[in-house]
Image (tube, rainbow, N blue to C red):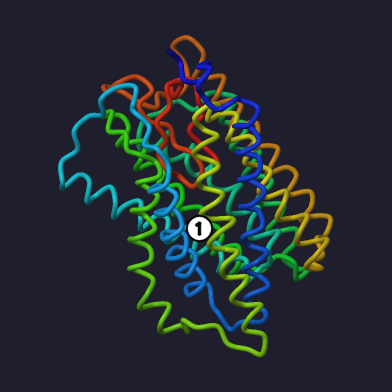
Amino acid sequence: MNPRTSSAALPVGRGLLFVIVSAVAWGTAGAAAALLFDSSGLGPVALTFWRTAGGLVLLAAVRAARRPARPATAPVAESARRRFTRVVATGLGLTVFQTAYFAAVEATGLAVGTVVTLGAGPVLIALGGRLLMGERLGRGGALAVAGALAGLGILVLGGEGSGTVVPRGVAYALLSALGYSAMTLYIRWRGRDGQAADPLGTTLSAFAVGAALLLPLATAEGLWPQGADLTRSVLLMAYVAAVPTALAYALYFAGLAVVRAATASVIALIEPVTAALIAVTLLGEHLGAATVTGTAVLLAAVTALVLAESRGASGPGAGREVVRGGRAGAQVVGRHGVAVDDADGHQAAPVRE
């Protein structure tokens, strides 16, 4: 029985709510980071360490408490060497993605850092899939990529003189998007062999690798918060680890059990919108006309790209194949590039984010 229609499954409406709440929660992570950068003395590396370490502990508790789901089909056996490579690759990608994102927020602000990161990610994935994996992009996808690049150009070049857009911060955002894209493409390539993995387990492993890699760097940068209001800093650090990390990931994976990945990818665009609204209304960031225009064009193009991939993948003989040579629909790539088992993977747009 299709788990999306099973009476025992999570209701679709509740699954949609879970994904929406996850996207909103992810949109608040950068805001909490911006507040910490202003008052705690923590840098991007140290904050990312505390996020991955705290998220690791909380997600491990979630996994231990929940009843393990029985897979619909037996997964392809994975050798110890392949598993080690997968864990290290996803851990490296996640570490670069999150650390560079926080560095972008610190350098160029919450709104621009989030929009550039989340807008450039799907574009890099689409181009990487075409160039490295031979995936068909299609006319609609090509136009969407061109539109996204145009929006990014308007945002960067139009806002550079206003002080809103800092080139160094944009470079960090692009590095963040590159880390996310490389991780996503690697997982998609592994999925061609039908080697699906437990998404929560993959995330836990990636967080463990990230925390181990970041600890010495965070120690050199300054591991502990400083300043007069340590209680506020500790509460914000706890929030980053608990809400936009542990809670958001847990809800997102639960929602993906009943929500198609293409739908989740579109809903996840709430994240940059949330971040931009918080930046303007609560953090006092000023967005010029060029920045607003570029942001709108970029997000519209990314939405079109997700929809084009979804239509192409469900059309006869067209679109991207998420899995080739393995079991059909073995793996889809969900939020933050984490692989998600999905029975409808052949119909889903494997982008986010």
Please name whichever residue, 63 or 65, is drawn nearer the observer in this view of the structure.
65
Across and down, in percent, residue 339 comes to 40, 39
Could you tell me which residue is drawn at 31 percent across and 33 percent down? 196
Question: Label 1's element?
Answer: helix
Across and down, in percent, residue 90 comes to 35, 51
Q: Count residues near mark 1 (Cα–Cα under 10 Å), then give few for <14, some for 14-19, many for 20+.
A: many
The quadrant holding residue 225 is bottom right
Farthest residue in the bottom direction? Answer: 228
Q: Is residue 322 left or right of residue 73?
A: right
> At label 1, which amino acid type do we have?
Ser
Across and down, in percent, residue 47 comes to 52, 71
Please name whichever residue, 334 or 159, is drawn nearer the observer in this view of the structure.
334
136 w.r.t. 247: above or below: above
Please name whichever residue, 242 or 346, is drawn nearer the observer in this view of the structure.
242
The quadrant holding residue 192 is top left
- State which quarter of the image contains the N terminus: top left
187 w.r.t. 47: above or below: above
Across and down, in percent, residue 330 comes to 35, 26
Could you tell me which residue is drawn at 29 percent across and 36 percent down? 190
118 w.r.t. 306: above or below: below
180 w.r.t. 15: above or below: below
- State which quarter of the image contains the C terminus: top right
Q: Is residue 50 left or right of residue 113?
A: left
Q: Residue under circle 1? A: 176
Could you tell me which residue is drawn at 42 percent across and 61 percent down? 57
